Image (cartoon, coloured by chain):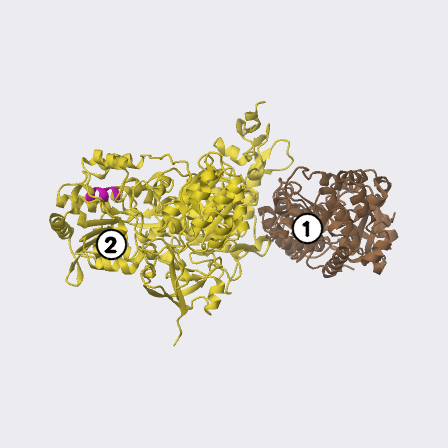
């Protein structure tokens, strides 16, 4: 069901001010962590809360923090990944624009947990609004002594740098983000070494998503038990879903994990636009496989969506109604992934280009017999064979669309036009 | 399990068990048992990036194909390098790579040695499913064939590029250069220079060599010959004492290119552009091909017989009249050992003179044999050994220019192994960019600075207990950090900080270069450095490299091409030759001084150009003009050959086989690539002809002489150096009157001595002498790049265009000496420790 934790004050325009944020109980978790808890306690609490990465992979946050070697003489860094660029996803932007201090407080607590004295928030370059909000909020937090030297008189120093990216999708991938932050070209690194061991400037580094970090103050304030009381056993807490596409009321909705997809689309989203029928749902950002109308009962948690054959991902739910041509959708997506492929590894770099050429020609009505088999074989040669998940992200929706809507593709090739009367536009 | 076993892992590759050191990749483990896994982006000296995906292997229990270049070998792994899945994966990668590749092999210079050709041949399929037009990078909207210059010598064809990024990666990782990068994204990624930049570092040629396809080609090789028509010849670079191993690629009488012949002890597969393009002097225009004899005012063509007859007659006249002491010899230390040996033997056994020297561009040097400097230089130094150090200290060397490849080893230990680099120089250098502290001292005060370091080490109680440090204060001057700071102009806390780093270091490599070896106060600086070395315990844990400069300086030292030799070396020569001249010999500087005083009547110069390279041009000219008889052997007409009575055509290194001794003391052989040009002859044959005409041949054949040469070259003196602190008093010269800017005469990065200006490719990087100034100095003179500046010293004047330095930030004038059009040695004074000059702008009319 809808449950406002991160969104408690999201509608209060004054929440961006540090005074309002503090008035709403802000920065108490930071103070509590710093004064009453040891870093290991913080990690323990977050581990117990079951908080999982909200950027897409769903890796347990507390576990990730505990990978930072405790005896390393090198400085450690915390990085907040605010390079939100997955098509269909716009939740981090809302948090930064409407509750920036929540993000700062989460970053501060996470920094303390891993022993970092310098943390970064890497914000997507196109995010003018969020950048300004975060910069202003960081300034205010410094002024109030929540950041800087000797925070709360505990002797703990913490600096925070707002860094803006150059606008590349790949920089949301954590190792590419590290390269970009170091001033190198945004291209993913091979792992191992993992960032927790050798990340930014070859020092131990933790990279967490905005939403993940924003959840941390609530967990510290209310305890792990409170957090696990929400959601399912393996997917605890709440998550923001960005609902878009052919629904009547698109928007960001915070739900307890485990809420059925139909509740989001029909009850909150007001159902499909123009009274049309649902065709398919992309549940977790554009790189996840489609769900079909008969899967609307699927619960929105990591395990249930995986069982249904897709992924929770970043929570970008894209709804497509019956008048949407699936080939057109895929053509838009592959265009995006071809454009964003960083150029490092061969299968993604060359494969996405080839796929775009093939899929566009089918979309244009110039498809040839055998093209679908060719597309499938190219997808097989990309999936699981690239440095980073961008290659997988590019081919998963294609494979899914080919599997679920093969007749539509075939119709396109045979008849040189769409099977459905396409409107060629999202709402 | 024993600790030795902890460092090993055993795995199975293609059914064969292999045990390798922990940390090795699967690819390397396979290689170690002769299983070749195909790669494009992997390189033994670069960090793996896993970009090309060609090196897939199947590892049991792993869900996906693994890239073997970036997968660490783990105990118990079962690896398959040739399974059906692996083959399918490779074929898919090749298909991807070839999608947009032009397949213009017939006109591609890489054809025949192209990784893409070879691997497609071995692993690919002959048909593509791709039925679109290939993507073409278009420039200037004219042609789809994209040829684009990245620098003076590198041409890029982006269509052929497979984006392995080895050029960009090596440029950054190994060479520390950021002038090349990738632009755009995805399959339209381009390799290009940074805005307003050129790929023109001295390492830039390596980027072409490392390219697996024909995307980067260099102008010398391009469209000139197919690789299968050439033959490979093993060679050694002649343009510094590093001794990089080269391969010359030749067809009949022409050399087409030089590439690296990887030797991990020395060059690790990298060479600088001097080595890569310097071969061009062999086939360059203007080579001397016949002997010349001066008749009246003109030098006219002559036969060898005429020339030798004349030389023999004149030498004999002089020797009979005034003795062999009136004949002197200057040999170029970049000559092969046989020529240097024959030169020394000619003088000592036939002309009965000890007046031989190879130290052609040295200022006045002490003439005593067995001094501390010689003791130190005769000890072993190891380039690979730099990797054992946690601190590298460079004193008085523009290392990147003097020893480009040693510089790479220093870079490696600093950037990859965490060692600290400290540089002490009178002006900032490019190699200082990675130093923990780059200390700039006031010109001519280095021993004061080193004394300060010694004092601080003792004060911080960090001195090694193998030396009695209590006497330091009475033996050195200045003997406080504060005084040292005042004299050298270096802040006291930086002296203390460096002293601490040196005192705490576990293993130090100390390197000095040309600024020390050519200094007239070399003895004092050497003593100061020895004190420092003893206090830091470097004798036990470290190495001192007083790096020799020329390709065979070390060989010349060992062969005794110097006037005064150690007793043991003289004894060797007596055994070899049955005699040795009695009279004390004169060094290069004294020979010219004696010529000026008409005490030396004849000079035989082999391979060097003192008129251009010897400090104090005025002095040299006056000396040479007074000579009765000058014989010069060289490859080209030089400022010195122009004054000669007889000019002899010398063969280049490519035209003979022989050996060089590099700065480590390693003897390295090079093979003959082409026949001697015209009537030119190797140095040893010339010496032998003269000897034969005078008295008797020096040798029956070079091969017969080789055992004698090797006996001297392999002789190790390794003298025990006394472990006591030495006296070091500082004498500081002040700039006088209107000449206030310290002058440094150095080799240009892309040039070496007087030879390389004949290389077309190297001249494309730089073809004239420059005055390098700091930005602030340039501003004071209202000078921009190219502005002409009059550089005047007390003794000479030259006009040079300005280059604004990217490194230098103090008030010094650095000028380059390698260009015959600009004899900048005119500015130097032989008795001056530091030359000072006055700079004025040449006003345009």
- B340 left or right of A356? left
Alpha carbons under labels 1 and 2: distance apart: 71 Å
The answer to if B117 sits in the magenta stretch is no
User: x, y percentage for residue B589?
Assistant: 27, 52
Judged by its main secondary structure, the magenta piece is helix
User: x, y percentage for residue B809?
Assistant: 49, 59
Image colour for chain A is brown
**B707 vs B758: above or below:** above
Q: Which residue is mark 1?
A: A172
Q: Chain of mark 2?
A: B
Q: Secondary structure at mark 1?
A: helix
Choose between A72 and B467: the one closer to the eye.
Answer: B467
Image colour for chain B is yellow
The answer to if B343 sits in the magenta stretch is yes
Q: Which residue is mark 2?
A: B592
- B615 left or right of A285? left
- Indicate which disc residue B758 carries: none
Q: Which numbered mark, 1 or 2, is in the foreground of this view?
A: 2
Q: Are marks 1 and 2 on the same chain?
A: no
Stretch of the chain drawn in magenta: B340-347
User: x, y percentage for residue A213?
Assistant: 76, 48
Q: Quadrant of the N terminus of chain B?
A: top right
Q: Chain of mark 1?
A: A
Q: Quadrant of residue B832?
A: bottom left
């Amino acid at each position: 069901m809808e449950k406002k934790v991160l969104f408690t004050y999201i509608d209060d325009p004054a929440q961006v001010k540090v005074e309002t944020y503090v008035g709403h109980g802000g920065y108490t978790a930071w103070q509590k962590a710093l004064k009453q808890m040891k870093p290991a306690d913080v990690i323990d609490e977050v581990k117990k809360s079951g908080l999982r990465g909200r950027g897409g992979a769903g890796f347990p946050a507390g576990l990730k923090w505990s990978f930072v070697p405790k005896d390393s003489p090198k400085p450690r860094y915390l990085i907040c990944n605010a390079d939100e660029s997955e098509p269909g996803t716009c939740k981090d932007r809302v948090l930064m624009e409407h509750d920036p201090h929540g993000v700062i407080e989460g970053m501060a607590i996470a920094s303390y947990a891993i022993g970092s004295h310098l943390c970064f928030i890497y914000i997507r370059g196109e995010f003018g609004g969020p950048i300004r909000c975060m910069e202003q909020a960081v300034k205010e937090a410094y002024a109030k002594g929540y950041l800087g030297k000797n925070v709360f008189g505990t002797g703990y120093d913490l600096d925070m740098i707002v860094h803006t990216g150059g606008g590349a999708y790949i920089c949301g991938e954590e190792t590419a983000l590290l390269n970009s932050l170091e001033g190198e070209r945004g291209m993913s690194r091979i792992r191992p070494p993992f960032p927790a061991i050798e990340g930014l400037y070859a020092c131990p580094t933790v990279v967490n998503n905005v939403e993940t970090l924003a959840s941390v103050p609530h967990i510290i304030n209310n305890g792990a038990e409170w957090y696990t009381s929400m959601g399912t056993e393996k997917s605890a807490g709440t998550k923001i879903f960005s609902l878009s596409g052919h629904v009547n009321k698109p928007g960001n909705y915070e739900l307890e994990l485990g809420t059925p997809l139909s509740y989001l689309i029909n009850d909150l989203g007001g159902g499909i636009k123009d009274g049309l029928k649902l065709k398919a749902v992309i549940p977790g950002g554009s790189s996840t496989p489609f769900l079909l109308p008969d899967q609307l009962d699927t619960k929105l948690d990591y395990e249930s969506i995986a069982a249904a054959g897709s992924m929770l991902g970043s929570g970008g739910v894209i709804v497509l109604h019956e008048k949407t041509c699936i080939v057109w959708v895929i053509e838009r997506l592959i265009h995006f992934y071809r454009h964003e492929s960083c150029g490092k590894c061969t299968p993604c770099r060359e494969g996405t280009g080839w796929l775009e050429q093939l899929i566009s020609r089918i979309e244009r009505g110039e498809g040839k017999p055998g093209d679908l088999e060719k597309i499938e074989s190219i997808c097989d040669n990309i999936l699981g064979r690239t440095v980073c998940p961008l290659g997988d992200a590019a081919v998963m929706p294609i494979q899914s669309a080919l599997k679920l809507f093969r007749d539509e593709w075939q119709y396109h090739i045979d008849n040189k036009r769409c099977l459905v009367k396409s409107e060629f536009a999202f709402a | 399990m024993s600790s030795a076993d902890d460092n090993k892992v055993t795995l199975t590759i293609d059914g064969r068990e292999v045990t390798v050191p922990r940390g090795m990749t699967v690819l390397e483990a396979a290689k170690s048992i002769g299983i070749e896994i195909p790669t494009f982006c992997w390189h033994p000296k670069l960090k793996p990036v896993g970009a090309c995906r060609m090196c897939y292997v199947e590892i049991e229990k792993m869900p996906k194909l693994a890239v073997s270049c970036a997968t660490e070998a783990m105990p118990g792994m079962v690896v398959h390098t040739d399974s059906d899945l692996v083959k399918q994966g490779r074929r898919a990668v090749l298909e991807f790579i070839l999608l947009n590749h032009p397949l213009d092999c017939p006109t591609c210079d890489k054809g025949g040695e192209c990784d893409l050709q070879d691997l497609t041949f071995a692993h690919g399929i002959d048909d593509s499913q791709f039925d679109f037009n290939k993507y073409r990078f278009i420039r200037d909207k004219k042609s789809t064939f994209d040829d684009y210059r990245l620098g003076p010598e590198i041409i890029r064809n982006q269509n052929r590029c497979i984006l392995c990024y080895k050029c960009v990666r090596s440029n950054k990782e190994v060479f520390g250069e950021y002038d090349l990068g990738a632009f755009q994204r995805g399959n339209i990624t381009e390799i290009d220079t940074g805005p307003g930049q050129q790929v023109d570092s001295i390492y830039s040629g390596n980027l072409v060599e490392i390219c697996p396809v024909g995307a980067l080609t260099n102008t010398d090789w391009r469209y000139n010959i197919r690789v299968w028509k050439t033959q490979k010849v093993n060679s050694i670079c002649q343009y510094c004492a590093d001794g990089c191993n080269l391969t010359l690629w030749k067809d009949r009488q022409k050399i087409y290119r030089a590439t690296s012949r990887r030797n991990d002890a020395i060059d690790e597969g990298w060479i600088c552009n001097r080595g890569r393009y310097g071969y061009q002097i062999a086939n360059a225009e203007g080579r001397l091909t016949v002997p010349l004899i001066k008749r009246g005012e003109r030098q006219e063509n002559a036969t060898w017989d005429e020339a030798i007859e004349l030389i023999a007659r004149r030498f004999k006249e002089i020797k009979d009249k005034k003795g062999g002491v009136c004949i002197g010899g200057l040999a170029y230390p970049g000559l092969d050992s046989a020529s240097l040996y024959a030169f020394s033997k000619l003088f000592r056994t036939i002309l009965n003179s000890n007046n031989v020297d190879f130290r052609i561009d040295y200022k006045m040097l002490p003439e005593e044999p067995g001094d501390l400097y010689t003791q130190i230089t005769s000890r072993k130094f190891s380039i690979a050994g730099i990797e054992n150090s946690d601190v590298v200290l460079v004193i008085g060397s523009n290392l990147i220019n003097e020893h480009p490849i040693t510089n790479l080893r220093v870079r490696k230990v600093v950037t990859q192994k965490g060692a600290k680099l400290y540089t002490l120089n009178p002006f900032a250098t490019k190699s200082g960019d990675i130093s923990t502290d780059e200390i700039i001292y006031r010109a001519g005060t280095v021993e004061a600075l080193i004394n300060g370091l010694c004092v601080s080490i003792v004060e911080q109680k960090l001195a090694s207990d193998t030396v009695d440090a209590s006497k330091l204060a009475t033996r050195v001057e200045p003997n406080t950090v504060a005084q040292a700071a005042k004299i050298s102009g270096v802040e006291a806390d930086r002296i203390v900080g460096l002293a601490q780093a040196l005192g705490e270091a576990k293993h130090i490599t100390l390197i000095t270069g040309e600024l020390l070896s050519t200094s007239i106060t070399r003895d004092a600086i050497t003593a100061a450095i020895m004190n420092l070395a003893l206090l830091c315990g470097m004798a036990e844990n470290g190495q001192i490299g007083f790096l020799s400069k020329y390709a065979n300086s070390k060989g010349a030292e060992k062969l005794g091409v110097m006037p005064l030799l150690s007793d043991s070396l003289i004894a060797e020569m007596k055994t070899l030759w049955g005699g040795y001249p009695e009279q004390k010999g004169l060094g290069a500087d004294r020979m010219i001084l004696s010529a000026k005083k008409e005490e030396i009547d004849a000079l035989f110069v082999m391979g060097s150009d003192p008129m251009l390279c010897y400090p104090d041009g005025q002095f040299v000219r006056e000396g040479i003009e007074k000579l009765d008889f000058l014989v010069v052997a060289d490859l080209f007409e030089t400022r010195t050959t122009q004054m000669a009575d007889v000019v002899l055509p010398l063969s280049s290194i490519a035209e003979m086989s022989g050996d060089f001794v590099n700065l480590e003391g390693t003897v390295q052989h090079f093979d003959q690539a082409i026949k001697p040009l015209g009537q030119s002859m190797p140095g040893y044959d010339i010496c032998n002809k003269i000897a034969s005409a005078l008295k008797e041949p020096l040798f029956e054949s070079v091969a017969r002489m080789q055992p004698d040469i090797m006996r001297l070259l392999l002789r190790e003196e390794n003298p025990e150096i006394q472990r006591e602190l030495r006296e070091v008093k500082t004498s500081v010269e002040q700039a006088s009157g209107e000449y206030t800017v310290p002058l440094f005469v150095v080799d240009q990065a892309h040039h070496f001595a007087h030879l390389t200006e004949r290389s077309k490719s190297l001249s494309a990087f730089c073809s004239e002498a420059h005055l390098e100034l700091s930005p602030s100095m340039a501003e004071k003179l209202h000078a921009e790049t190219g502005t002409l500046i009059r550089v005047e010293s007390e003794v000479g004047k030259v006009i040079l265009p300005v280059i604004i330095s990217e490194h230098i930030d103090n008030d010094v004038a650095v000028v380059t000496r390698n260009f015959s059009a600009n004899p900048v040695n005119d500015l130097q004074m032989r008795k001056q420790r530091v030359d000072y000059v006055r700079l004025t702008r040449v006003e345009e009319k």
